[in-house]
Image (tube, helix red, strand yellow):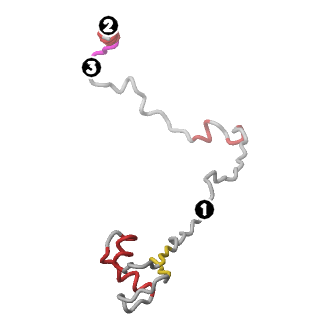
Amino acid sequence: MMKRIVIVFVLSMLTMVGCKKPAGPQTTETSDLSAPVRPVSKLMPVESLPETTTTVEPVVDAREPEILVTPTPPPVRTHTVCEGDTLWSVAKKFYGDGRRWKEIAAANGITNESKLPIGKVLRIP
């Protein structure tokens, strides 16, 4: 790696030695600023220009079409009341928190939470 760096450095130094020009003010003798300006049509007449035709290619959209996804409703969960079940125990089983028993009661129209009939199928929201 070090050899490459040295070689690049030496080559760049050699090329710079032969390329330096003395710095000095530019004279107007070397550049001709008074040359007449000619319009492009005088340089190359319109008749001699090659004819070009333009064709417009239709733009094809290569993206995949959008797919509309309708959200699926959550699955309806149910629980059949067994002997010894309470709304608290059902809420604890499904939600992990017995304090959410009121959500189950409201979804099933239960007004008296102390009387759960055995065999009743509860919807769990």
Is 21 drawn above or below residue 107 in the view shown?
A: above
Q: Nearer the viewer, residue 80 or 16?
A: 80
Q: What's the residue type where badge 2 is placed?
A: Lys
Q: Is residue 74 magenta?
A: no
Across and down, in percent, residue 7 comes to: 33, 8
Disc nearer the start of the sequence (1/2) = 2
User: Upstream in the sequence, badge 3 or badge 1?
Assistant: 3
Residue at mark 3: 23
* Quadrant hosting residue 103: bottom left
Q: Position of residue 116 (x, y in %)?
A: 41, 86
Q: Which x, y percent locates residue 57?
A: 70, 50
Tell me the kind of residue under disc 1: Ile
Q: Distance between the Cα atoms at labels 3 and 1? A: 69 Å
Give the foreground label among 3 and 2: 2
Q: Which residue is at a point 38% across and 92% down the rendered structure image? A: 111
Badge 2, how many Cα within 10 Å: few under 14, some, many 20+? few
Kindly identify which numbered label has been placed on residue 3: 2
The amino acid type, in three-letter code, at marker 3 is Ala
Give the mark, 3 or 2, whose residue is nearer the N terminus.
Answer: 2
The magenta segment is 18-22
Residue linked to disc 1: 67
Q: Going 34% across and 13% down the picture, which residue do you hit?
A: 19
Q: Nearer the viewer, residue 118 or 11?
A: 118
Left or right: 58 in relation to 66: right
In the structure shown, which secondary structural element does the residue marked by tag 1 occupy?
A: loop
Q: Which mark identifies residue 103?
A: none
30 lies left or right of 37 = left
Toward which corner of the image does residue 90 lie, by quadrant? bottom left
